[in-house]
Image (spheres, rainbow, N blue to C red):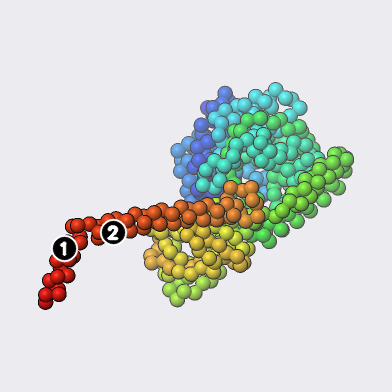
Amino acid sequence: METTPFVSIICTVFNKEPWLKKTIDSFLVQQTEFAIEIILVDDASSDGSRSIIQDYQANYPNLIRAFYQDENQGIAKTWVSICKEARGKYIARCDGDDFWLEPLKLQKQVDLLESKPDCKWSNTDFDIYDERGNFVSKAGFANHTIPLADTYEKMLATRGFTMASTWLVDRDLMLEVNQELDLTTSDDTFNLQLELFQRTSLAYLDEATVAYTINQGSDSRPCDFRKLERRFHKLLQTQLAYLDKYPNADFKEMTKILLDRTNTYEIRLSKPMDSLSHIGMESVTIYLGDEENTYSEDRTLTKLLQKEDCLTIEIPKGTSVIRVDLSERPSYYSDVELKDSSGKVCSAVYSNGVVVDNLYLFSEPDPQLIYEVEEEGVYQLSYKMISIDNPSAPDYIGKVFAAEMLDCQNSLKNLEAELQATKEAYNTVIHSRRWTIPTKILKFLRIRK
């Protein structure tokens, strides 16, 4: 006899192949006193996500229900339609690139909601990971890495965050607010959170139960500035619409929140601009040149600029050179290194900057490096930026140059000492009896000839 699930885990997926197995595995290890179901929906992925879902569904047919869309519908439409398939009293949401850290996550949240009759929605704290699965920081809410928006006013005024992959929501309430969702919205969770706050209080579990993956290039973190600009304008339209939709909100409280944010931003803007301020707003662009050394926009790779990063570059057949545009502005690096598949370091054949030992100094816009590549395969490009405007930073360029100069001075002193020792050894030899007597004999013999 089939057991009716008490919680339905819903995971929407679009091109999440690198993370999806870890995500699903974190569902499977949940320890609960109640039955659960796992609903996986693939929104017409073009990578191997569908295949992964099929494998898991085949291995866990009584636990996992899989749904596949032949055409991409977008997150909002996909979410609204798949929630109708949930059979549990509660819906737990998790994005396909996040994963759960706590095996008792669901049990703890259910216990929390069952103890609070006025709450039909729960969230938790979270840790942050990068897209390669490396730990970045812990307890995003507790450490104020990202502020928790725990009221309608905070959410609307600040475009706040409750971390959707931590949610546990009453199913009937979720279906109700889904009816209010703008299916063309830039961020489905923004609208959903606003609607949820109008209907229930948020029960917060002060424990990091989820890993939030900062995935550059996703819909919520677009690399292209124009896309980011469009996203912000759409969010503003949503904010203005909700001012009219719920006119009984506490506008005085929202004004206080905005005044505080404005004051904070003005203080930040008053600080001297650091040379690393463009991190996260510009991209590293890699152009793949063909056999005639020509570049095209069709053969490019882009990655959001970080202070320090290591990029994997797939070099296809027919590529003879690659051009690396490290950023758009003048910038400075303590190291830039390209390695081929064997680990051999490739030397740049051209640079529009100055290279001093391991320092790469680009005082003009559009820093560029050009490398010749001898074979196809996987290459690794690593770089590390240094600061030029913050003297207190450990990698301040003045400190870097001072350390380099000190090393050069020490090396020079060592070489001078070695030279002096060599001179003394030489003089000792040429003035010894073993040297002078044979030398006189040879000189005498030359004269006799």
Residue 438: assigned label = 1
Task: Tell which circle, 1 or 2, labels the residue nearer the N-terminal end.
Answer: 2
Left or right: residue 4 compared with residue 246: left
User: Could one spot residue 194 in this view of the protein?
Assistant: no
Residues 210 and 63: in front is: 210
Give percent across and percent down for residue 254.
83, 42
Residues 158 and 401: in front is: 401
> Which circle, 1 or 2, is nearer the viewer?
1
Label 2 is placed on what type of residue?
Tyr
How many badges with numbers are in the image? 2
Residues 17 and 308: in front is: 308
Q: In which quarter of the image is the C terminus?
A: bottom left
Left or right: residue 94 compared with residue 412: right
Give percent across and percent down for residue 402.
55, 53
Mark 1 and mark 2: Cα distance apart in space = 16 Å
Location of residue 47 with respect to 352 vertically, above or below: above
The residue located at (54%, 30%) in the rendering is 103
The residue located at (51%, 68%) in the rendering is 351
Q: How crowded is mark 1: few (under 14 residues within 10 Å), some or many (20 or more)?
A: few
Location of residue 415 with respect to 296 vertically, above or below: above
Q: For mark 2, what is the residue?
A: 426
Location of residue 118 with respect to 435 vertically, above or below: above
Q: Which quadrant of the structure image shows residue 90?
A: top right
Label 2 sits on a secondary structure element that is helix
Q: Disc 1 vs disc 2: Cβ atoms closer than 8 Å?
A: no
Label 1 is placed on what type of residue?
Pro
User: Could one spot residue 24 in this view of the protein?
Assistant: yes
Give percent across and percent down for residue 35.
57, 28
The residue located at (76%, 27%) in the rendering is 118
Left or right: residue 429 compared with residue 398: left
